Image (spheres, rainbow, N blue to C red):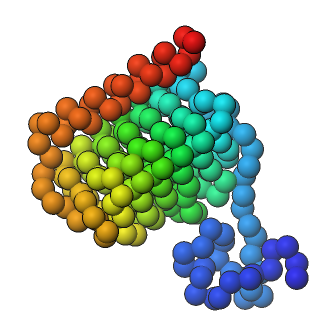
Amino acid sequence: MPLNACQFPADFCRTSFCDPCEPTRSRQLNFDYTPTSESIHPSALVVPSATVVGRVTLGEESSIWYQAVLRGDCESISVGARSNIQDGVILHADPGLPCQLGDQVTVGHGAIVHGAKVEDNCLIGIRAVILNDVHIGEGCLIAAGSVIPEGTTIPPYQVVMGIPGKVVRETRESDQRRIGHAWQHYVKASSAYRDN
C-alpha cells in the first residue's frame, strides 16, 4: 500500500488529521516535525525534557514544563504571554482547528487541550480534557478531571465540572484570585529555574 494511501473509512475524513480524501481514496499527509525556535519569545522557558515541535508560538514569560508535549505538526499551537503548560500536558490540533491559549492561562499537570481555544485568565485543572472546536471564555475555571466535549462553548467567568463538563456556577472573586495566583506562581518559578 502506498505511504499516502487511505487506511480509514470514508466518513473518518470529517474528523481526521489529514486532507480530505480524493476520489482515488488517497490523501496527502501534512506533518511538520521541525523543532520550533524562531517563534519562541526570548523570555519564554522550555525545560529540556519538554517536546515542542512544528508550528508553535510561545508568548512572553510563558513556561513549558517537564514532559509536556506541544506537537504543532498538522496545525498551529499558540500559547499566550505568562501562560504555563505544566508537567505532562499535551497540546495538539487538527487541520482547521488550531490550539490557541490566551494570556495568563494555566494548564494543570497531565491535562490535554486538543484543537480548542482558551481565552485569557483561565485555569484548566489537572487531568482535564478539552476536545476539538471547544471555545472557553475568559476567566473560566475548568475543574480537575473534567472532559469538555467537542464543539462546546463555555461563556466567560464560569466554573465547569464533570464528565461531560457542565457549568456549575459563575466564578467568584476567590476563583479569580486562584487563577491569578497560578499564573503568577509559574512566572516566578520560571524565573527561579533560569537563575539556577
Q: Is residue 19 above or below residue 43?
A: below
Q: Position of residue 84 (x, y in %)?
A: 44, 35
Which residue lies most toward the top here?
A: 195
Q: Position of residue 109 (x, y in %)?
A: 45, 45
Q: Tell me if 36 is positioned left or right of 137 in this view.
A: right
Residue name at image x 47 percent, y 30 percent = 62
Residue 184 makes an appearance in the image = yes
Q: Tell me if 16 is positioned left or right of 174 in this view.
A: right
The image quadrant of residue 165 is bottom left
Residue name at image x 63 percent, y 88 percent = 10
Q: Position of residue 195 (x, y in %)?
A: 55, 11
Q: Tell me if 122 is positioned left or right of 60 in this view.
A: left
Which residue lies most toward the right here?
A: 1
Residue name at image x 65 percent, y 42 percent = 51
Residue name at image x 66 percent, y 31 percent = 48
Quadrant (top left, top right, bottom left, bottom right) of the N terminus? bottom right
Residue 56 makes an appearance in the image = no
Q: Position of residue 169 (x, y in %)?
A: 12, 56
